[in-house]
Amino acid sequence: KKVELKGEVFESLPSATFKVRLGDERIIFCHLSGKMRLHHIKVMVGDQVILEMTPYDEGKGRIIQRL
C-alpha cells in the first residue's frame, strides 16, 4: 500500500530528481513519475507537489502531481 503526502520542492538535482520538504519538516529524495516525464511537466523549486511513498523506505518517494 502506498502513502500519498503533500510537500514543497526544496532543491532540484540532476536527472529529474528533487529534494522535497514535507509538512513535518522531513526532507525526502524524490524522482518524477513516468507520466510526468512523458508529458514534459516541469517542476521547479518552490512548487507544491503530491508524492507517493512506500511504508518500507521513508527516505525516497515519487512525485505524481504538481499543484
Image (tube, rainbow, N blue to C red):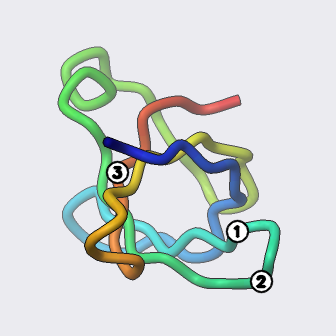
Q: Compared to 44, does 41 lie above or below?
A: above
Quadrant for the N terminus in the image: top left
Q: Secondary structure at mark 1?
A: strand
Q: Which residue is mark 3?
A: 62
Question: Which badge, 1 or 3, is on the more N-terminal residue?
Answer: 1
Left or right: 63 as drawn, with respect to 6: left
Residue pictured at 59% horizontal, 40% vertical: 50
The answer to which quarter of the image holds residue 21 is: bottom right
Disc number at residue 22? 1
Q: Nearer the viewer, residue 48 or 24?
A: 24
The answer to which quarter of the image holds residue 38 is: top left
Residue type marked 3 = Arg
Q: Are marks 2 and 1 in contact (CB under 8 Å)?
A: yes
Task: Report x, y in % for residue 33.
Answer: 27, 37
Disc number at residue 25? 2
Quadrant for the C terminus in the image: top right
Q: Compared to 4, does 35 lie above or below?
A: above
Residue pictured at 54% horizontal, 43% vertical: 4
Residue pictured at 25% horizontal, 21% vertical: 35
